Image (cartoon, grey):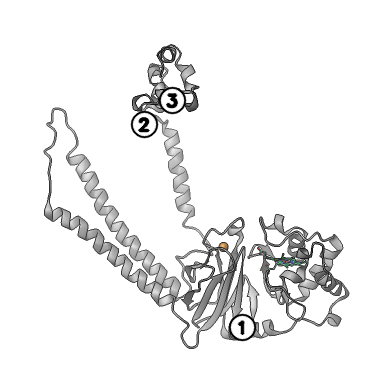
């Protein structure tokens, strides 16, 4: 800092507050004289508050702020005990979910034990050896073999206690399908899930149907970036990576609809990459498979509106990349391979990665502008007019 600037700083501390870093001459930036110290001369009665140390600042807070903060904390703590929480790992619904829950509890207890021991020692030492007036500085201790061995061994033992069951669980759940298991290929896309059932040839999206009590093995890969399949109550999560096949094995033990979602940030609509796992008894599952294997209604049994929709669906658009049949597959109608298979769209409860209800209104909203309905959607705004949208909704709803 130059001489006259220092003088000015002392005379008019306010002015120095406006000095920006770049305004300070380069040679002035010595260690002892960095911008933070420029405000030092003003440390008089009008000294800015931020110069006090953090503890003093907390002590100076009016008590009502502290009470308010505690009240908000308590509110969060109590609301966390309510429910329902459809994506809670604490209510497992399958073997993998139970394993994960068991690991979580093991680690929680170990960490809790460490916390209690460390905090008790800390509080004991802070009180027992606190500074007293006139007390000489404490003697230094150097080297204590027993202590050093024990504080190296104790964490190592705890980490082994965590690592062994964790790795065992990973190995147990990422192997090839055992005999009798249901194998499903899962393909992660920005931002939806594709499922292909090896034995039945069924292809669907976002809503995975599996039977209760039978092992399921998901063979998972990605069409683009890294995703992660996670249906918390059933277990998981496991990364879904392009060029790799990761497996996830679990056996659901209760019937129900279990929500899940992508658990690896994968771009703009990552948060909208939801999924459902529909666990049903084996009769309902077989019925679902049989229905998925049906071909769609032939054009002449469609209603006039739906037939118009089929025409709109087949229409070659300008630019051609806006043409439905380039992207979507419908058995016997089109073989496009970029978007979800629509052959049995009507059997799904939601569209666009579990985001929008599969109703006439939801479908129309989607077709009108997919990019507003789902930020970043890889389905373009095709530029449909309202009559085309109405016809397409009628057609899409015929695909049961
Ligand atoms: C450039 C490729 C492309 C074109 C063209 C296209 N789509 Fe899509 N479509 C997609 C993709 C990708 C998705 C999945 C979007 C998501 O969920 O993030 C999708 C989703 C959908 C869905 C929801 C499916 C589900 O199960 O979630 C419907 C319905 C749909 N498209 C209908 C149409 C119709 C009708 C047309 C023609 C008017 C069309 N699409 C044109 C790529 C396309
Ligand atoms: Cu994802």
Q: Is residue 371 left or right of residue 72?
A: right
Q: Is residue 66 left or right of residue 189?
A: left
For image coordinates 40% across by 13% down, the residue present is: 3
**Viewer-side label of 3, 1:** 3
Please say if 151 is above or below 394: above
Which residue corresponds to mark 3?
26
Of 186 and 71, which appears nearest the observer?
A: 186
Who comes first in sequence, dot 1 or dot 2? 2
Which residue corresponds to mark 1?
284
**Viewer-side label of 3, 2:** 3
Toward which corner of the image does residue 46 lie, by quadrant? top left
Which residue corresponds to mark 2?
59
Toward which corner of the image does residue 307 lie, by quadrant? bottom right
Who comes first in sequence, dot 3 or dot 1? 3
User: How far is mark 3 from mark 1, CA to CA?
Assistant: 76 Å
User: How far is mark 3 from mark 2, CA to CA?
Assistant: 38 Å
Mark 2 neighbour density, 10 Å: few (under 14) some (14–19) many (20 or more): few
User: SS of the residue at dot 2?
Assistant: helix
Mark 3 neighbour density, 10 Å: few (under 14) some (14–19) many (20 or more): few
């Amino acid at each position: 800092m130059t001489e006259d600037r220092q003088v000015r700083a002392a005379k008019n501390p306010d002015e120095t507050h406006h000095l920006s870093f770049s305004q300070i001459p380069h040679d002035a930036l010595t260690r002892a004289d960095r911008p933070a110290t420029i405000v030092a001369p003003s440390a008089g009665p009008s000294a800015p508050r931020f110069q006090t140390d953090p503890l003093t600042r907390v002590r100076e807070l009016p008590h009502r702020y502290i009470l308010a903060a505690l009240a908000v904390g308590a509110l969060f703590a109590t609301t966390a005990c309510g429910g329902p929480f459809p994506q809670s790992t604490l209510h497992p619904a399958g073997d993998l979910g139970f394993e994960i829950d068991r690991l979580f509890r093991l680690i929680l207890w170990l960490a809790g034990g460490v916390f209690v021991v460390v905090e008790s020692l800390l509080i004991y030492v802070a009180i027992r050896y606190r500074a007293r007036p006139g007390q000489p500085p404490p003697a230094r201790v150097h080297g204590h073999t027993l202590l050093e061995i024990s504080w190296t061994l104790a964490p190592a033992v705890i980490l082994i206690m965590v690592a062994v069951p964790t790795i065992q669980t990973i190995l147990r759940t990422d192997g090839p399908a055992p005999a009798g298991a249901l194998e499903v290929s899962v393909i992660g896309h920005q931002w939806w899930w594709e499922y292909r059932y090896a034995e039945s040839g069924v292809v669907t999206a976002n809503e995975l149907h599996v039977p209760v009590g039978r092992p399921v093995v998901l063979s998972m890969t990605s069409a683009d970036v890294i995703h992660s399949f996670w249906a918390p109550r059933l277990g998981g999560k496991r990364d879904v990576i392009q060029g790799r096949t990761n497996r996830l094995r679990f056996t659901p033990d209760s019937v129900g609809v279990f929500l899940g979602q992508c658990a690896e940030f994968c771009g703009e609509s990552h948060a909208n990459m939801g999924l459902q796992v529909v666990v049903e008894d084996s009769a309902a599952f077989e019925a679902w498979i049989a229905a998925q294997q049906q071909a769609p209604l032939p054009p002449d049994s469609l209603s006039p509106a739906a037939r118009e929709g089929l025409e709109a669906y087949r229409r070659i658009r300008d630019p051609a990349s806006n043409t439905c049949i380039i992207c979507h597959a419908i058995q016997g109608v089109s073989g496009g391979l970029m978007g979800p298979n629509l052959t049995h769209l009507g059997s799904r409860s939601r569209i666009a990665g579990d985001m929008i209800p599969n109703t006439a209104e939801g479908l129309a909203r989607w077709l009108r502008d997919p990019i507003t309905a789902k930020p970043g959607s890889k389905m373009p705004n095709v530029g449909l007019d309202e009559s085309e949208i109405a016809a397409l909704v009628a057609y899409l709803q015929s695909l049961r």
